[in-house]
Amino acid sequence: TQLLEQSPQFLSIQEGENLTVYCNSSSVFSSLQWYRQEPGEGPVLLVTVVTGGEVKKLKRLTFQFGDARKDSSLHITAAQPGDTGLYLCAGEPGSNYKLTFGKGTLLTVNP
Amino acid sequence: DAGVTQSPTHLIKTRGQQVTLRCSPISGHKSVSWYQQVLGQGPQFIFQYYEKEERGRGNFPDRFSARQFPNYSSELNVNALLLGDSALYLCASSLVRTVNEQFFGPGTRLTVL
């Protein structure tokens, strides 16, 4: 079973601070995705990375896929209260059309 | 365009009962996947259906079953409910048989008493 370990599990910061959350595995993934989920709602796709070493930017969010395609990070610059939510990474091991999710990082940005 | 819709939004059942959850994918999407999300955990893959056929199954008992209809909507059935089946059940749709561009619905919150 391919596992995705996310860290930290909880993160509480002040508005304007920067943060990084991590997603690590001992397995190789053909693609990796980041989602944000708010209470009572389904996850919303933020980005998909497919190439080792790939870096994608989405406004204040920067996503990186490790060279070996086993890990990823999400960096948020100047966090805002609207960034509050559960950040989930998910990977597709091989091409078997099954997504494996991490447990998530619960981010709280205080005004 | 409407996103993925799921019904009902909330459901309360007792142990041993059976439940059916429904999902309508985004118009034009032919693939539907089902996930179970227990409180404090990430979603766990249950099934993927593409073109009305089961294409993938996660590590769930045979009490869980699903089907996809000609209009690509889908139902998830769970028999002989256990307390541990209490969770948020999520449906995700994608245009083709891929998990790279999945769009999730709001989920059905199932509580088993």
Image: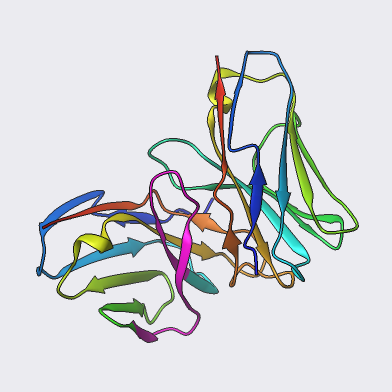
A45 versus B24 height, above or below: below
Residue at 65 percent of width and 47 percent of height: B6
Count the numbered circles shown: 0
Question: Residue A11 at x, y = what percent?
Answer: 18, 53
Question: Which part of the image, by quadrant, shows the C terminus of chain B?
Answer: top right
Magenta residues, as a range? A33-57
Position of residue A71 measured from the top left corner of the image (x, y, whole percent): 37, 69
* As drawn, A62 above or below A26: below
Return the residue nearer the eye: B20 or A21: B20
- For image coordinates 66% across by 20% down, the residue present is B81
Task: Specify the quadrant of the image occupied by residue A59.
Answer: bottom left
Q: In this rendered view, identify the residue nearer to me: B60 or B111.
A: B111
Position above or below: A75 against B74: below
Coloring applied to the structure: rainbow
Give how far across and how far down residue B110 sits, in percent: 57, 30
Q: Residue at x 39, y 45 (%)?
A: A39
Horizontal relation, residue B83 to residue B79: left or right: left
**Magenta region includes residue A47:** yes
Q: Residue furthest front?
A: B1
Quick check: B59 left or right of A74?
Answer: right
